[in-house]
Amino acid sequence: MKYLTYNGYQLATKNKLQEAIQTYLNCIDRTLINDGQALADIKTKIIAHIVFFNNEYPRCKPIRASWYSHDKKDWLLSGVDFANFHIYQVKTDYKYA
């Protein structure tokens, strides 16, 4: 299965922590993930980056991010209220003649 990251909408950030997380999510927006193991890896890395940013900006209110599966195949990054970051399963590969 292939997956695609998508950062849907963004609200104004309130502090440097939120700005750093939003910049990171923009960097990995529309990334193609080739298999289930890579999906697990990128989900872990995204949470790890958010924890790292929490430690980098200790004066800001920490972001408690987690993954929520609103469908059996799609994922939403919850706890990040200023961004709407999803990982969608790619249903079909387009093949042209």
Image: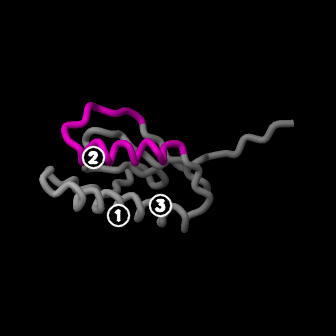
Q: Tag 2: residue type?
A: Val
Residue 13 drawn in magenta: yes
Q: Quadrant of the C terminus?
A: top right
Disc 3 marks a residue whose amino acid type is Ile
Identify the image quadrant of the N terminus: bottom right
Left-right relation of 67 to 33 = left
Q: Magenta span covers which residues?
A: 8-30
Residue position for label 3:
42
Please tell me how crowded label 3 is: few (under 14), some (14-19), or many (20+) other residues with Cα within 10 Å.
Answer: some
User: Toward the viewer: 37 or 55?
Assistant: 55
Residue at figure coordinates x 42%, y 51% from the top left: 75
Q: Are circles 1 and 3 on residues that touch, CB within 8 Å?
A: no
| Residue 40 % position (x, y) | 47, 65
Residue 48's disc number: 1
- Label 1 vs label 2: CA separation? 14 Å
Q: Nearer the viewer, residue 27 or 70?
A: 27
* Distance from the alpha carbon under mark 3 to that under mark 2: 16 Å
State which mark lies toward you, 1 or 3: 1
- Badge 2: residue crowd in 10 Å (few <14, some 14–19, many ≥20): some
Asked which secondary structure carries label 2, the reply is loop
Is 78 colored magenta in this rendering?
A: no
Vertical side of 46 occupied by 13: above or below = above
Question: What SS does tag 1 mark?
Answer: helix
CA separation, marks 1 and 3? 10 Å
Residue 37, picture quadrant:
bottom right
- Asked if the residues shown at circle 1 and circle 2 are in contact, with their CB atoms under 8 angstroms apart, the answer is no
Tell me the residue at 29%/32% (across/down).
Answer: 11
The mark nearer the N terminus, 1 or 3, is 3
Compared to residue 3, the image places residue 47 above or below, namely: below
User: Residue 80: which disc?
Assistant: 2
